[in-house]
Image (cartoon, grey):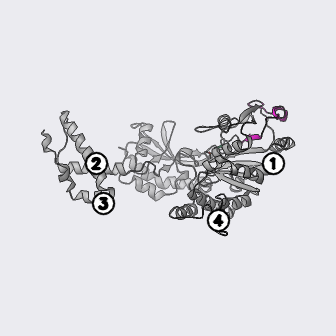
Amino acid sequence: MRLAAIPSVDRILQDSRLASAIGRHGRELVVAELRAELAERRAALKGGAGAALDEEAIVAALLSRLELAAQPSLRPVFNLTGTVLHTNLGRALLPREAIEACARVQAGPANLEYDLEIGERGERDDHLEALLCRITGAEAAAVVNNNAAAVLLALNALAAGREVPVSRGELVEIGGSFRIPEIIEAAGCSLREVGTTNRTHLRDYEKSIGPKTAAILKVHTSNYAVVGFTAGVAEPELAQLAHAKALPFVTDLGSGSLVDLARWGLPAEPTPMQALAAGADLVTFSGDKLLGGPQAGLVVGKRGLVERLRKSPMKRALRLDKGRIAALEAVLRLYLDPERLAERLPALRQLTRTTAGITAAAERMRPVLQDWCGRLAKVTVAPCASQVGSGSLPVDRLPSAALRIASSQVRPAAIAKALRALPVPVIARIHEDAVWLDLRCLEDEEGFAANLCGRSLA
Ligand SMILES: *Cc1c(COP(=O)(O)O)cnc(C)c1O
């Protein structure tokens, strides 16, 4: 093959099919990708391998290269893992109200830190504090980047250079890199371990308190359960001890639901209201777990303590941007009407779906998925168990329904990989030699069908 037979860059750029590609991607990217494509073909020829040299083949290859290059790295997927608040898949989905509120302030200037009444500098927490106090009954509230940041800020502002006693049964690690002992150290405090893994008594806390103690921390053990011969100290007792020693009592609630989930037949998760009633001076919890909002860390409690957090330089480093403040405000407003919450808040809507409803969805989607599998695999509707995720209610499971793909010809890992390669990647779960698609979190059935339509596993 003669290298000279390869058409020139200029010639290919004249191709009529590239006009719209140039309009969409810009001339620079099209030229760069074309050069890369031609270089690959030249290299293949030099290496003795065959390569198509006609314009037709080169343009087709270029167009698919451009598609790939334009694909964003962060993009939507179908979460059919059965874990509703999936940390790796972005946790809670925002309600329409929050997305619109966020879009409104992102597109232009907003009174983020500006008091419209007096025409002077304001405080960004002001947009959320009154709402949070109204919902939780707290005196004051502050908001930061996530709950890990809230814990870090609270410890740093209240206890830097001093000791914080924590029960050995609560030295938790949350997925990724949040470990209580490390957060305490990063906050500039020293951890004072109290009691044992399975049993901690009030006298253990009493013994641990000395002149260096700055606060008592209680951590909600959100992603595991210690069962058997166990003992912990009830929060009111711990609060009483802290207050007798003039120490703040801080509770890291983790998920923390703003409503009693029992109302919808879901297992109970402690609320910030309960923690405050039990005597906590500060309670921290996440915005994107059971609360169902954007990533955020919320702190509610005593005014004097919240003010100390707000004055810390760390608060500035951990603050929220206007988009998330707007989204969080919109989500919190939904809580003012709890009766409609389960239909308006996606996290709660998905958690409260009935098994019958999910099974019916699975029946509707089964033929679509069977078409995609063709003769390579068999799709059945099977009962399964979803979980809340993000460490909430770790031992509780919610009965659900799944599409189960079983095959004697294609390995489950290969099927799962093919599902992830769809235009909108479908994230499933492999269990007992089959691929399971839990339909609890599938709300866009039309989109799911369109994603599979005209494609196949083979
Ligand atoms: C999830 C969790 C955190 C971390 O919260 P993020 O919002 O993910 O930063 C901290 N503590 C507990 C107990 C948790 O469950």
Question: Real-space Cα distance between discs 3 and 2?
Answer: 15 Å
If you read the primary sequence from the N terminus, does the residue marked by circle 1 or circle 4 appear first? Answer: 4
Q: What residue does disc 2 label? A: 32
Task: Name the residue furthest top.
Answer: 196
If you read the primary sequence from the N terminus, does the residue marked by circle 2 or circle 1 appear first? Answer: 2
Residue 84 lies, in percent from the top left, at 58, 49
In-image side of 220 versus 294 (left or right): right
Instruction: Mark 2 and mark 1 in contact? Answer it, CB < 8 Å.
Output: no
Question: Real-space Cα distance between discs 3 and 1?
Answer: 62 Å
Local secondary structure at mark 4: strand
If you read the primary sequence from the N terminus, does the residue marked by circle 2 or circle 4 appear first? Answer: 2
| Residue 246 among those drawn in magenta | no
Residue 385 lies, in percent from the top left, at 59, 45
Q: Residues within 10 Å of mark 4 (few under 14, many from 20)?
A: few
Local secondary structure at mark 1: loop
* The N terminus - image quarter: top left
Question: Real-space Cα distance between discs 2 and 1?
Answer: 64 Å
Q: What residue does disc 3 label? A: 23
Residue 279 lies, in percent from the top left, at 81, 48
In the picture, the disc for residue 278 is: 1
Which residue type does callout 4 highlight? Glu
